[in-house]
Image: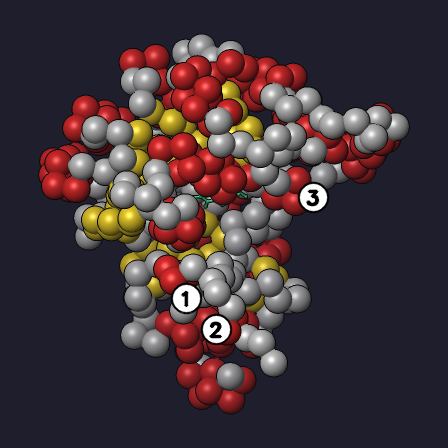
């Protein structure tokens, strides 16, 4: 019998755990920040037709550079952030923004190089960094999960990283960064600065996007995804905006034909129906703000959120609360700083189930014990 330990696997991968948000079959899955609203019947039809259209040409490789899709993504970003002034030449796309991050590390990280992040933040940044052979250094966010520009700059000066990750709005805290903090890091950083904006479309009015800084900063990369607000997590489409020279660097490491013709067609169709897909964002923002207020009303600590999830605590035994909720059919996420839990914002019915399950889990510790 062969186990993983018997294989000649890389030494630095030994003992590592695979990424593992539980995929459980529960009535109420509020654990991976998906958009709870599925595509309409009309859009399902349009997606089917788009796949039919390319099906007849699947004997051929797809457009290696996904030029039409990148033009569509640039147009979307220009509408999302007035003044972004992007063209397809400044946009790059891949299978989820996780693949985007992997390509960034393949091009700008690697053996002998370092990436820096400010934790708590997105768990895949260190994982992808290490798998790419890059050294990971973590600095910490402030107590309120923000990032003081002077502290951020000090960490950059100390470690001189080749890649810096800033997540705004941050996962799992929901906190957005002011542009001053991002610009301070850009001025101090010797290498690339990645601003992961996976949740940008959920930001509150007045919260800026780093896209507006691209014009002045050729070493800035802003990453986005269609997995969250865009309600297309199953499509696997992430993208970035950056200087055209950055796109040239990524062309050196991407696999040929990495984006299938089906993915490109589905993503373009989704973008053409962007208004409908993003139609749920306003409702989710409202539901988020109501969830924050409700949790604070319980006397809990709650992080400010510009995203579609809420981080709340603190629970000396967060595992017990998480299990108590799961026993009641509500799956949330045990992630981030110890004693905190994260809930993704779902439909009004799902949030009602969340409130009922949390109230029960918190006020009935005996029932909690029996159910776990
Ligand atoms: C969900 C998430 C992503 C990406 O996901 P993909 O589905 O790979 O596009 C990237 N960054 C953050 C911070 C996320 O939370």
Asked if ligand 1 lies within 8 A of label 1, the reply is no
Between 50 and 144, the residue placed more toward the observer is 50
Work out which residue is located at the far front of the displayed protein and give it: 8
Q: Under tag 2, what secondary structure?
A: helix
Specify the label residue 38 is tagged with: 3
Residue 62, given in percent of the width and then of the height, sits at 72, 26
At 49% from the left edge and 42% from the top edge, which residue is drawn?
98
* Residue 370 showing in the rendered view: yes
Q: Judge depth for marks 1 and 3 and give the one in front.
A: 1
* Figure check: 121 above or below 285: below
Check whether the beta carbons of the residues at disc 1 and disc 2 lie within 8 A of each other: yes
Instruction: Estimate the spatial distance between the alpha carbons at disc 3 and disc 2, rounded to whole Å.
Output: 41 Å
Between 192 and 322, the residue placed more toward the observer is 192
Q: In which quarter of the view is residue 363 placed? A: bottom left
Quadrant where the N terminus is found in the figure: bottom right
71 lies left or right of 340? right
Residue 300, given in percent of the width and then of the height, sits at 32, 62
Q: Earlier in the sequence, mark 1 or mark 2?
A: 2
Q: What residue would you read off at disc 2?
A: 5
At 52% from the left edge and 49% from the top edge, which residue is drawn?
33
Q: What residue would you read off at disc 1?
A: 14
* Figure check: 337 above or below 104: below
Instruction: Estimate the spatial distance between the alpha carbons at disc 1 and disc 2, rounded to whole Å.
Output: 7 Å
Q: Earlier in the sequence, mark 3 or mark 2?
A: 2
Instruction: Estimate the spatial distance between the alpha carbons at disc 1 and disc 3, rounded to whole Å.
Output: 39 Å
């Amino acid at each position: 019998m062969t186990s993983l330990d018997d294989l000649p696997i890389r030494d630095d991968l030994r003992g590592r755990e695979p990424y593992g948000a539980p995929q459980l079959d529960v009535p109420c899955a509020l654990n991976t920040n998906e958009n709870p609203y599925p595509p309409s019947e009309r859009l399902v039809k349009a997606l089917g037709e788009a796949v039919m259209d390319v099906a007849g040409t699947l004997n051929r490789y797809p457009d290696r550079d996904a030029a039409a899709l990148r033009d569509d993504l640039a147009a979307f970003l220009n509408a999302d952030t007035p003044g972004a002034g992007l063209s397809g030449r400044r946009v790059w796309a891949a299978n989820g923004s996780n693949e985007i991050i992997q390509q960034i590390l393949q091009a700008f990280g690697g053996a002998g190089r370092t990436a820096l992040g400010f934790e708590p933040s997105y768990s895949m940044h260190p994982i992808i960094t290490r798998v790419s052979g890059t050294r990971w250094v973590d600095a910490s966010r402030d107590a309120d999960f923000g990032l003081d520009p002077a502290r951020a700059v000090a960490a950059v000066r100390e470690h001189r990283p080749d890649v810096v990750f800033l997540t705004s709005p941050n996962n799992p805290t929901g906190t957005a960064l002011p542009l001053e903090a991002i610009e301070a890091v850009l001025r101090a950083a010797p290498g690339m600065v990645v601003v992961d904006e996976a949740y940008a479309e959920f930001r509150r009015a007045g919260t800026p996007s780093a896209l507006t800084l691209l014009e002045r900063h050729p070493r800035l990369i802003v990453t986005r995804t269609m997995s969250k607000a865009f309600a297309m997590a199953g499509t696997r489409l992430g993208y970035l905006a950056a200087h055209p020279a950055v796109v040239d660097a990524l062309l050196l490491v991407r696999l040929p034909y990495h984006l299938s013709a089906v993915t490109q067609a589905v993503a373009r169709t989704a973008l053409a129906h962007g208004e409908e897909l993003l139609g749920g964002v306003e409702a989710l923002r409202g539901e988020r703000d109501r969830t924050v207020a409700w949790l604070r009303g319980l006397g809990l600590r709650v992080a400010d959120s510009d995203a579609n999830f809420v981080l709340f605590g603190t629970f000396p035994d967060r595992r017990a609360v998480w299990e108590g909720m799961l026993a009641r059919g509500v799956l949330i996420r045990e992630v981030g700083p110890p004693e905190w839990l994260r809930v993704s914002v779902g439909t009004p019915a799902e949030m009602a189930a969340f409130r009922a399950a949390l109230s029960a889990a918190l006020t009935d510790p005996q029932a909690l014990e029996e159910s776990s």
